[in-house]
Amino acid sequence: MSNLETPENIHCTRSHEYVIVDGETGIIGITQYATEQLGEIVYVELPEVGTTIPKGEAFGTVESVKAASEIYMPVSGTISEINHRLTSEPELINDDCYNEGWIIKVADFSKEDLEEAMPMDEYLSFIEE
């Protein structure tokens, strides 16, 4: 796995989504490991702003040259922003998944759900198993 700079306050799920806590906002995307497994991402289906989605439900899809995969909510929350750049530049997810390649931002996210996600060091151990 190449080494992208990993942000602080990041938590990951077993299905390879992440949430970065930025104050009261949760920034959600897919992990570097997921991007490497998928290969070149060519399309991203984004949800509507204002939609409240419970933890574990699919909120969108990423399609790569290899496969299409649903993206699942790591925490329950209301979508406050979507990364519009991904509609014309889906490769941002491959290039910089933790910064420019984020997928959605959520407000009012569940702090309890966040506690169930893995800190990055635990996630890295999980993917090495």
Image (tube, rainbow, N blue to C red):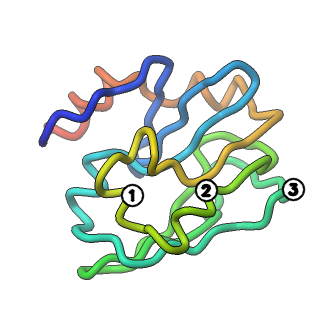
Q: Nearer the viewer, mark 3 or mark 2?
A: 2
Q: Position of residue 122 (x, y in %)?
A: 31, 23
Q: Which mark is residue 92?
A: 1
Whether residues under marks 1 and 2 lie with C-beta atoms below 8 angstroms apart, the answer is yes
Secondary structure of residue under mark 2: loop
For the point 65% across and 40% down, which residue is it? 75
Secondary structure of residue under mark 1: helix
Left or right, 37 with respect to 72, comes to left
Q: Which mark is residue 83?
A: 2
Residue with the mark numbered 3: 50
* Pointer 3 or 2: first along the chain: 3
Identify which amino acid the numbered label 1 is placed on. Leu
Q: Position of residue 77 (x, y in %)?
A: 77, 43
Q: Position of residue 120 (x, y in %)?
A: 35, 25
Left or right, 1 with respect to 79, comes to left
For the point 83% across and 33% down, which residue is it? 108
Left or right, 39 with respect to 61, comes to left
